[in-house]
Amino acid sequence: MGMKVIDRFSRQCLAHLNAARRGTLAALVLLSAGLLSCVPDKQAPVKIKVLSLNPEEYFGTQIQLKGKVVALGPAEAYWVVEDETGRVLVGTERIARKMGCQSQSQVELEGTLLKLKSVSQPYFSMKKLISCIP
């Protein structure tokens, strides 16, 4: 699916660039409008299984996750978040406590995947709680 999206955007951008080569003012207007449509509007949440299978691709990169909180750590310092593909440990930096998000809530998060010496699996450090639905 990802390749089809890239191909569609690539063809669309190429068409706009070819039109611009013709040098007309109309082509420049189309190019300006068209290039803006070449960039996807919103970052889609990454599936947890994808993070598990390819963590090196995501270490240090700002990404989004979406899933259900299935466990809370002491003082809500971390969560275990699950989607239909797997589970990941999420450091909440105590953001969750301020938002009143509890176990079994559906959440959408933004943050960074980290590799820590003290944790054997990849660790997602939450920077922003986008939504929390009890």
Image (cartoon, grey):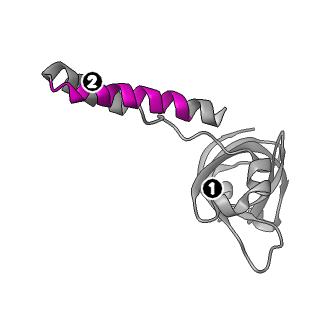
Nearest to the observer: residue 104 or residue 39: 39
Report the disc number at residue 19.
2
Question: Does the magenta portion include 13?
Answer: yes
Dominant secondary structure of the residues highlighted in magenta in the image: helix
**At numbered mark 2, what does the secondary structure look like: helix, strand or loop?**
helix
Rendered view: 42 above or below 73: above
Give the amino acid at mark 1. Lys
Q: CA distance from mark 2 to mark 1?
A: 52 Å
**At numbered mark 1, what does the secondary structure look like: helix, strand or loop?**
helix
Which residue matches tag 1? 98
Q: x, y (%) of residue 95?
A: 63, 58
Q: Which tag, 2 or 1, sits closer to the chain's start?
A: 2
Looking at the image, can residue 68 be seen? Answer: yes
Q: Residues within 10 Å of mark 1 (few under 14, many from 20)?
A: few
Q: Quarter-wise, where is residue 124 in the image? A: bottom right
Q: Where does the magenta region start and end?
A: 6-23
